[in-house]
Image (cartoon, grey):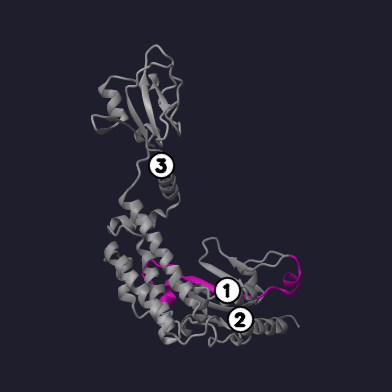
Amino acid sequence: MKININFLKENNLILFECISGSTAYGLNTASSDIDIKGVFYLPKEQFFGLNYIPQVSDEKNDVVYYEIGRFIELLSVSNPNILEMMFTDEQFIKINCPLFQKIKKDFLLSIACKNTFAGYAFSQIKKAKGLNKKIVNPIDKKRKTVLDFCYVSEFGKSIPIHKYLEANKLKQENCGLVKLNHMKDVFALYHSLVINYSGIISSEKANDISLSSVEKGEKALATFYFNKDGYSQYCKEYKQYWDWVAKRNEARYENTVSNEANYDAKNMMHTFRLLNMAEEIATESTLNVFRKDREFLLSIKNGERTYDELVQLAEKKLKKVQLAFDNSDLNKEPNIKALENILIEIRTELYK
Protein backbone atom coordinates (compact mmCIF):
# COMPACT_ATOMS: atom_id res chain seq x y z
CA MET A 1 0.00 0.00 0.00
CA LYS A 2 1.60 3.26 -1.15
CA ILE A 3 0.82 6.21 1.09
CA ASN A 4 1.02 9.53 -0.76
CA ILE A 5 -0.92 12.80 -0.80
CA ASN A 6 -3.49 11.53 -3.30
CA PHE A 7 -4.07 8.42 -1.18
CA LEU A 8 -4.68 10.57 1.92
CA LYS A 9 -7.26 12.68 0.09
CA GLU A 10 -9.02 9.82 -1.70
CA ASN A 11 -9.44 7.92 1.60
CA ASN A 12 -10.48 10.91 3.74
CA LEU A 13 -7.51 10.48 6.06
CA ILE A 14 -6.81 14.19 6.52
CA LEU A 15 -7.69 15.60 9.96
CA PHE A 16 -6.42 19.12 9.42
CA GLU A 17 -5.20 21.20 6.50
CA CYS A 18 -4.17 24.84 6.17
CA ILE A 19 -2.39 27.24 3.85
CA SER A 20 0.99 27.99 5.37
CA GLY A 21 4.15 29.91 4.56
CA SER A 22 4.17 33.42 3.11
CA THR A 23 0.41 33.50 2.45
CA ALA A 24 -0.43 32.60 6.06
CA TYR A 25 2.09 35.20 7.25
CA GLY A 26 0.58 37.87 4.99
CA LEU A 27 3.98 38.23 3.35
CA ASN A 28 3.13 36.75 -0.04
CA THR A 29 3.94 38.58 -3.25
CA ALA A 30 3.09 37.89 -6.90
CA SER A 31 5.92 35.36 -7.18
CA SER A 32 5.11 33.46 -3.96
CA ASP A 33 4.17 29.77 -4.01
CA ILE A 34 1.20 28.39 -2.10
CA ASP A 35 2.39 26.12 0.72
CA ILE A 36 0.10 23.59 2.36
CA LYS A 37 0.51 21.81 5.67
CA GLY A 38 -1.74 19.28 7.29
CA VAL A 39 -2.27 16.37 9.65
CA PHE A 40 -3.42 12.85 8.71
CA TYR A 41 -3.94 9.46 10.26
CA LEU A 42 -2.92 6.11 8.82
CA PRO A 43 -5.25 3.22 7.99
CA LYS A 44 -5.45 0.87 10.95
CA GLU A 45 -3.33 -1.87 9.33
CA GLN A 46 -0.63 0.62 8.38
CA PHE A 47 -0.47 2.15 11.85
CA PHE A 48 -0.31 -1.13 13.76
CA GLY A 49 1.95 -2.82 11.20
CA LEU A 50 5.61 -2.41 10.33
CA ASN A 51 5.23 0.42 7.81
CA TYR A 52 4.50 3.42 10.00
CA ILE A 53 4.90 6.66 8.02
CA PRO A 54 5.38 9.86 10.05
CA GLN A 55 5.24 12.35 7.17
CA VAL A 56 4.10 12.66 3.56
CA SER A 57 5.14 15.46 1.19
CA ASP A 58 5.43 16.41 -2.45
CA GLU A 59 8.76 16.62 -4.27
CA LYS A 60 9.37 20.29 -3.46
CA ASN A 61 8.16 20.05 0.15
CA ASP A 62 5.59 22.76 -0.61
CA VAL A 63 2.88 20.37 0.59
CA VAL A 64 3.57 18.50 3.83
CA TYR A 65 1.28 16.34 5.98
CA TYR A 66 2.24 14.96 9.40
CA GLU A 67 0.83 11.78 10.92
CA ILE A 68 -1.13 12.74 14.05
CA GLY A 69 1.37 11.10 16.41
CA ARG A 70 4.30 12.87 14.80
CA PHE A 71 2.37 16.14 14.88
CA ILE A 72 1.70 15.84 18.63
CA GLU A 73 5.33 14.88 19.21
CA LEU A 74 6.53 18.05 17.45
CA LEU A 75 4.01 20.14 19.39
CA SER A 76 5.45 18.77 22.62
CA VAL A 77 8.89 20.20 21.74
CA SER A 78 7.49 23.59 20.63
CA ASN A 79 8.45 23.22 16.99
CA PRO A 80 7.76 26.64 15.37
CA ASN A 81 6.32 25.28 12.09
CA ILE A 82 3.93 23.01 13.96
CA LEU A 83 2.83 25.64 16.48
CA GLU A 84 2.14 28.03 13.59
CA MET A 85 -0.33 25.51 12.17
CA MET A 86 -2.29 25.57 15.42
CA PHE A 87 -2.45 29.39 15.40
CA THR A 88 -3.14 29.91 11.70
CA ASP A 89 -5.93 32.41 10.94
CA GLU A 90 -9.33 30.82 10.26
CA GLN A 91 -9.36 32.17 6.69
CA PHE A 92 -6.44 29.88 5.81
CA ILE A 93 -7.78 26.68 7.42
CA LYS A 94 -9.28 24.32 4.84
CA ILE A 95 -9.99 21.20 6.93
CA ASN A 96 -10.46 21.02 10.70
CA CYS A 97 -12.11 17.78 11.87
CA PRO A 98 -13.87 17.65 15.27
CA LEU A 99 -11.36 15.07 16.50
CA PHE A 100 -8.47 17.38 15.71
CA GLN A 101 -10.19 20.20 17.58
CA LYS A 102 -9.61 18.28 20.81
CA ILE A 103 -6.11 19.80 20.71
CA LYS A 104 -6.45 23.11 22.53
CA LYS A 105 -4.10 26.08 22.21
CA ASP A 106 -4.21 26.90 25.92
CA PHE A 107 -1.26 24.78 27.04
CA LEU A 108 0.92 24.83 23.91
CA LEU A 109 2.94 28.02 24.38
CA SER A 110 5.65 28.03 27.01
CA ILE A 111 9.11 29.29 27.95
CA ALA A 112 10.47 26.56 25.65
CA CYS A 113 9.51 28.80 22.71
CA LYS A 114 12.41 31.07 23.61
CA ASN A 115 14.84 28.47 22.31
CA THR A 116 12.82 27.13 19.41
CA PHE A 117 11.86 30.55 18.03
CA ALA A 118 14.56 32.98 19.18
CA GLY A 119 17.25 30.29 19.38
CA TYR A 120 16.60 29.23 15.80
CA ALA A 121 16.56 32.88 14.72
CA PHE A 122 19.96 33.38 16.36
CA SER A 123 21.36 30.42 14.42
CA GLN A 124 20.06 32.04 11.22
CA ILE A 125 21.89 35.27 12.07
CA LYS A 126 25.11 33.28 12.37
CA LYS A 127 24.28 31.65 9.06
CA ALA A 128 23.69 35.08 7.51
CA LYS A 129 27.10 36.23 8.75
CA GLY A 130 28.69 33.21 7.07
CA LEU A 131 26.84 33.95 3.83
CA ASN A 132 27.86 37.61 4.00
CA LYS A 133 31.47 36.55 4.35
CA LYS A 134 31.19 34.28 1.31
CA ILE A 135 29.58 36.97 -0.85
CA VAL A 136 31.95 39.77 0.19
CA ASN A 137 35.06 37.56 0.13
CA PRO A 138 34.72 35.08 -2.76
CA ILE A 139 37.46 32.46 -3.03
CA ASP A 140 39.16 32.07 -6.40
CA LYS A 141 38.43 28.78 -8.15
CA LYS A 142 42.15 28.18 -8.74
CA ARG A 143 43.32 26.54 -5.55
CA LYS A 144 46.37 27.91 -3.77
CA THR A 145 49.31 25.60 -3.11
CA VAL A 146 51.51 25.05 -0.08
CA LEU A 147 54.05 27.43 -1.63
CA ASP A 148 51.59 30.32 -1.29
CA PHE A 149 51.95 29.95 2.49
CA CYS A 150 55.76 29.76 2.59
CA TYR A 151 58.17 32.59 3.42
CA VAL A 152 61.85 33.25 4.05
CA SER A 153 63.42 35.69 6.47
CA GLU A 154 65.96 38.04 4.91
CA PHE A 155 67.35 41.32 6.22
CA GLY A 156 64.72 41.43 8.94
CA LYS A 157 61.84 41.05 6.47
CA SER A 158 59.42 38.24 5.59
CA ILE A 159 59.50 37.50 1.87
CA PRO A 160 57.06 35.16 0.06
CA ILE A 161 58.95 32.15 -1.24
CA HIS A 162 57.78 32.79 -4.82
CA LYS A 163 59.42 36.23 -4.82
CA TYR A 164 62.55 34.92 -3.12
CA LEU A 165 63.02 32.13 -5.64
CA GLU A 166 62.35 34.44 -8.59
CA ALA A 167 64.71 37.14 -7.34
CA ASN A 168 67.50 34.61 -6.86
CA LYS A 169 66.70 32.62 -10.03
CA LEU A 170 66.15 29.42 -8.07
CA LYS A 171 63.75 26.53 -8.60
CA GLN A 172 61.82 24.99 -5.71
CA GLU A 173 62.63 21.51 -7.06
CA ASN A 174 66.33 22.07 -6.32
CA CYS A 175 65.73 23.18 -2.74
CA GLY A 176 65.99 21.20 0.45
CA LEU A 177 64.46 21.84 3.86
CA VAL A 178 65.70 20.77 7.28
CA LYS A 179 63.65 21.22 10.45
CA LEU A 180 65.04 23.65 13.02
CA ASN A 181 64.72 22.36 16.58
CA HIS A 182 62.53 24.20 19.10
CA MET A 183 60.90 26.31 16.36
CA LYS A 184 57.43 25.38 15.09
CA ASP A 185 57.15 25.18 11.28
CA VAL A 186 60.59 26.83 10.84
CA PHE A 187 63.26 25.26 8.63
CA ALA A 188 66.69 25.87 7.12
CA LEU A 189 66.54 26.35 3.34
CA TYR A 190 69.25 24.81 1.15
CA HIS A 191 69.80 24.77 -2.61
CA SER A 192 71.93 22.72 -4.96
CA LEU A 193 72.03 21.86 -8.66
CA VAL A 194 74.22 18.81 -7.86
CA ILE A 195 72.69 17.30 -4.74
CA ASN A 196 69.34 15.63 -5.30
CA TYR A 197 67.19 17.45 -2.72
CA SER A 198 63.48 16.65 -2.34
CA GLY A 199 62.31 20.14 -3.23
CA ILE A 200 60.05 22.34 -1.12
CA ILE A 201 56.94 20.44 -2.28
CA SER A 202 56.68 17.17 -4.19
CA SER A 203 53.96 18.49 -6.53
CA GLU A 204 51.39 21.28 -6.93
CA LYS A 205 48.82 19.05 -5.19
CA ALA A 206 50.97 18.39 -2.12
CA ASN A 207 49.41 19.22 1.24
CA ASP A 208 52.69 19.58 3.11
CA ILE A 209 56.30 20.54 2.52
CA SER A 210 59.03 17.98 1.81
CA LEU A 211 62.06 17.45 4.03
CA SER A 212 65.56 16.56 2.74
CA SER A 213 68.71 15.00 4.13
CA VAL A 214 71.53 17.55 4.07
CA GLU A 215 75.20 16.66 4.55
CA LYS A 216 77.06 18.26 7.42
CA GLY A 217 78.85 21.40 6.36
CA GLU A 218 76.33 22.52 3.74
CA LYS A 219 75.49 26.19 4.11
CA ALA A 220 71.85 27.25 4.45
CA LEU A 221 70.58 30.02 2.20
CA ALA A 222 67.90 31.37 4.50
CA THR A 223 65.47 30.65 7.34
CA PHE A 224 62.24 29.25 5.90
CA TYR A 225 58.74 29.37 7.45
CA PHE A 226 55.66 27.38 6.44
CA ASN A 227 52.39 28.90 7.71
CA LYS A 228 50.82 25.49 8.17
CA ASP A 229 47.88 26.71 10.27
CA GLY A 230 47.07 29.36 7.65
CA TYR A 231 47.18 26.76 4.88
CA SER A 232 44.89 24.39 6.83
CA GLN A 233 42.38 27.19 7.44
CA TYR A 234 42.48 28.15 3.76
CA CYS A 235 41.79 24.53 2.69
CA LYS A 236 38.79 24.39 5.03
CA GLU A 237 37.36 27.69 3.78
CA TYR A 238 38.04 26.76 0.14
CA LYS A 239 36.06 23.53 0.51
CA GLN A 240 33.21 25.22 2.38
CA TYR A 241 32.97 28.01 -0.20
CA TRP A 242 32.90 25.81 -3.29
CA ASP A 243 30.56 23.29 -1.64
CA TRP A 244 28.25 26.25 -0.98
CA VAL A 245 28.54 27.42 -4.60
CA ALA A 246 27.60 23.94 -5.81
CA LYS A 247 24.54 23.69 -3.56
CA ARG A 248 23.24 27.28 -3.41
CA ASN A 249 19.87 28.31 -4.81
CA GLU A 250 20.99 30.31 -7.84
CA ALA A 251 17.76 32.31 -8.16
CA ARG A 252 17.92 33.48 -4.54
CA TYR A 253 21.65 34.14 -4.83
CA GLU A 254 21.25 36.26 -7.96
CA ASN A 255 18.48 38.23 -6.24
CA THR A 256 20.73 38.80 -3.24
CA VAL A 257 23.60 40.03 -5.41
CA SER A 258 21.41 42.16 -7.69
CA ASN A 259 19.92 44.13 -4.79
CA GLU A 260 23.41 44.46 -3.24
CA ALA A 261 22.16 43.19 0.11
CA ASN A 262 25.13 40.85 0.62
CA TYR A 263 22.96 38.47 2.64
CA ASP A 264 20.15 36.02 1.96
CA ALA A 265 17.35 38.59 2.21
CA LYS A 266 14.52 36.06 2.42
CA ASN A 267 16.26 34.11 5.14
CA MET A 268 16.97 37.30 7.11
CA MET A 269 13.31 38.35 6.79
CA HIS A 270 12.18 35.10 8.43
CA THR A 271 14.81 35.56 11.13
CA PHE A 272 13.14 38.82 12.21
CA ARG A 273 9.69 37.28 11.83
CA LEU A 274 10.68 34.57 14.32
CA LEU A 275 12.24 37.09 16.71
CA ASN A 276 9.12 39.25 16.67
CA MET A 277 6.90 36.19 17.15
CA ALA A 278 9.04 35.10 20.10
CA GLU A 279 8.64 38.47 21.81
CA GLU A 280 4.87 38.37 21.25
CA ILE A 281 4.64 34.86 22.72
CA ALA A 282 6.40 36.08 25.86
CA THR A 283 4.43 39.32 26.25
CA GLU A 284 1.01 38.44 24.79
CA SER A 285 0.85 34.65 25.41
CA THR A 286 -0.26 34.07 21.84
CA LEU A 287 1.29 33.32 18.46
CA ASN A 288 0.48 35.87 15.76
CA VAL A 289 1.01 34.00 12.52
CA PHE A 290 -0.50 36.68 10.27
CA ARG A 291 2.01 39.51 10.55
CA LYS A 292 1.26 43.15 11.31
CA ASP A 293 4.90 44.03 10.59
CA ARG A 294 4.57 43.19 6.88
CA GLU A 295 6.16 46.43 5.60
CA PHE A 296 9.21 46.06 7.84
CA LEU A 297 9.70 42.40 6.95
CA LEU A 298 9.28 42.97 3.21
CA SER A 299 11.77 45.84 3.35
CA ILE A 300 14.31 43.25 4.55
CA LYS A 301 13.32 40.78 1.83
CA ASN A 302 13.72 43.54 -0.78
CA GLY A 303 17.24 44.29 0.42
CA GLU A 304 16.40 47.83 1.53
CA ARG A 305 18.41 47.54 4.76
CA THR A 306 22.13 46.99 5.11
CA TYR A 307 23.60 43.81 6.51
CA ASP A 308 25.33 45.60 9.41
CA GLU A 309 22.12 47.44 10.31
CA LEU A 310 20.16 44.19 10.47
CA VAL A 311 22.76 42.38 12.56
CA GLN A 312 22.71 45.22 15.10
CA LEU A 313 18.89 45.25 15.15
CA ALA A 314 18.80 41.47 15.58
CA GLU A 315 21.23 41.52 18.50
CA LYS A 316 19.16 44.21 20.25
CA LYS A 317 15.98 42.24 19.59
CA LEU A 318 17.52 39.06 21.04
CA LYS A 319 18.25 40.86 24.30
CA LYS A 320 14.69 42.20 24.36
CA VAL A 321 13.27 38.71 23.76
CA GLN A 322 15.43 37.26 26.53
CA LEU A 323 14.16 39.88 28.99
CA ALA A 324 10.55 39.30 27.90
CA PHE A 325 10.79 35.55 28.61
CA ASP A 326 12.54 36.19 31.93
CA ASN A 327 9.50 38.22 33.00
CA SER A 328 6.89 35.97 31.40
CA ASP A 329 4.15 34.05 33.25
CA LEU A 330 4.20 31.21 30.73
CA ASN A 331 4.68 27.64 31.88
CA LYS A 332 8.17 26.21 31.69
CA GLU A 333 7.19 23.75 28.95
CA PRO A 334 4.08 22.53 27.09
CA ASN A 335 1.68 20.26 28.99
CA ILE A 336 3.08 17.06 27.56
CA LYS A 337 0.85 14.80 29.62
CA ALA A 338 -2.26 16.57 28.35
CA LEU A 339 -0.99 16.25 24.76
CA GLU A 340 -0.36 12.54 25.26
CA ASN A 341 -3.87 12.01 26.69
CA ILE A 342 -5.40 13.83 23.71
CA LEU A 343 -3.39 11.69 21.29
CA ILE A 344 -4.60 8.52 23.01
CA GLU A 345 -8.16 9.81 22.89
CA ILE A 346 -7.95 10.65 19.18
CA ARG A 347 -6.37 7.32 18.28
CA THR A 348 -8.96 5.43 20.31
CA GLU A 349 -11.74 7.14 18.33
CA LEU A 350 -10.00 6.56 15.00
CA TYR A 351 -9.29 2.86 15.47
CA LYS A 352 -12.14 1.59 17.64
Residue 348 at x, y = what percent?
Answer: 72, 83
Q: Amino acid at mark 1?
A: Leu
Give neighbour class at mark 1: few <14, some 14-19, many 20+ (Cα, 10 Å). some
Query: Which numbered tag is attached to residue 336?
Result: 2
Specify the segment rendered in magenta.
Answer: 22-50
Q: Quadrant of the C terminus?
A: bottom right
Give neighbour class at mark 2: few <14, some 14-19, many 20+ (Cα, 10 Å). some
Q: Quadrant of the rendered structure where residue 300 is?
A: bottom left
**What residue lies at 28% left-to-right and 26% top-to-bottom?**
164
- In this view, 78 is above or below 154: below
Residue at which label 3 appears: 229
Disc 3/disc 1 C-alpha distance (Å): 43 Å
Which of the two marks, 1 or 2, is nearer to us in this view?
A: 2
- In this view, 246 is above or below 291: above
Disc 2/disc 3 C-alpha distance (Å): 49 Å
Which residue in the rendered view is the most extreme toward the top?
Answer: 194
